Image (cartoon, rainbow, N blue to C red):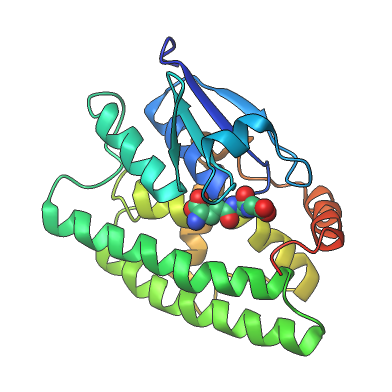
Amino acid sequence: MAGGNDLKVLGVWTSPFVIRVRIVLNLKGLAYEYVEEDLGNKSALLLGSNPVHKSVPVLLHAGRAINESQVILQYIDEVWAGTGPAVLPADPYERAVARFWGAYIDDKVESAWLGMLFRCANEEERAAAVARAREALDALEGAFRDCSRGRPFFGGDDIGFVDAVLGGYLGWFGAVGRIIGSRLIDPARTPLLAAWEDRFRAADVAKGVVPDDLDKMLAFLQTLRAMNYAK
Ligand SMILES: N[C@@H](CCC(=O)N[C@@H](CS)C(=O)NCC(=O)O)C(=O)O
């Protein structure tokens, strides 16, 4: 790990947005301090660092705050361009494609994620959100085929931008799988993406960052629901 960069991440351990930032810091081999926030009682540092959205993640680099996870990923890639693998592709067209899919994931997958876990009043509403998630995953199956060109990740041989953006959701996908009794990324329907999920979960940069304790995730879900999170 490269130290001495004065990096601090304000986060919540289950947040897909925080997880993707930690994955990219790991990918770059950058040491950082991680500070767990309580969304029910946000710290003065969080409120002062992200006064617009008051959300995590916040990356503090030498005391200066960078907000919004996809902006943070691009910042890390630019500042530490010479350290570790590139997060975004070098080619401008491929960079545009990666940014397109990153935006797609936070549009379609995020809304389905909120629907599956937080905004469903009954099992019928949850099933509708699962169907929306699987439709988005169908599109991502095609994206994976085009971006990876037979290699293991969206980013090619290494985990890259789209991998980190989508990979941040895998902890919650596991929890959804437990609730619905089947894998959200269905190997029969989206086989390339299901194989990608297995590879991503096994990657060193994901270990200890993508949550795999489903009981703990589901207990945390109850806490968030009690807080009326994401209403
Ligand atoms: N678009 C933001 C989303 C961040 C976000 O929604 N974070 C949640 C945690 S998963 C949060 O901090 N919510 C603030 C709150 O609950 O008050 C990003 O990509 O960073």
Looking at the image, which residue is at 65% across and 69% down? Answer: 114
In percent of width and height, residue 6 lies at 45, 16
**For the N terminus, which image quadrant?**
top left
Query: Relative to 85, is 43 on the left or the right?
Result: right
Q: Where is residue 115 in the image (x, y as percent from the top left)?
A: 66, 75
Question: How many dots with numbers?
Answer: 0
Q: In this view, does 63 lie above or below 215?
A: above
Depicted 21 relative to depicted 16: above or below: above
The residue at the point 61 percent across, 30 percent down is 45
Q: Which quarter of the figure has residue 134?
A: bottom right
x, y percent for residue 73: 38, 42
Q: Is residue 190 left or right of residue 209?
A: left
Return the residue nearer the eye: 156 or 84: 84
Q: In this view, does 114 lie to the left or right of 81?
A: right
Question: Looking at the image, which is closer to me, 14 or 224?
Answer: 224
Q: Is residue 139 left or right of residue 23?
A: left
- Asked whether 151 or 218 is in front, the reply is 218
Q: Residue at x 26, y 67 (%)?
A: 146
Placement of the C terminus among the 4 image quadrants: bottom right
**Eyeballing the image, is 159 above or below 167?**
above
Q: Can residue 59 be seen in this view?
A: yes
Which residue is depicted at the point 35% across and 49% down? 161
Quarter of the image for residue 222 reads: bottom right
Work out whether residue 149 can be spotted: no
Q: In this orientation, which residue lies closer to the viewer: 137 or 72? A: 72
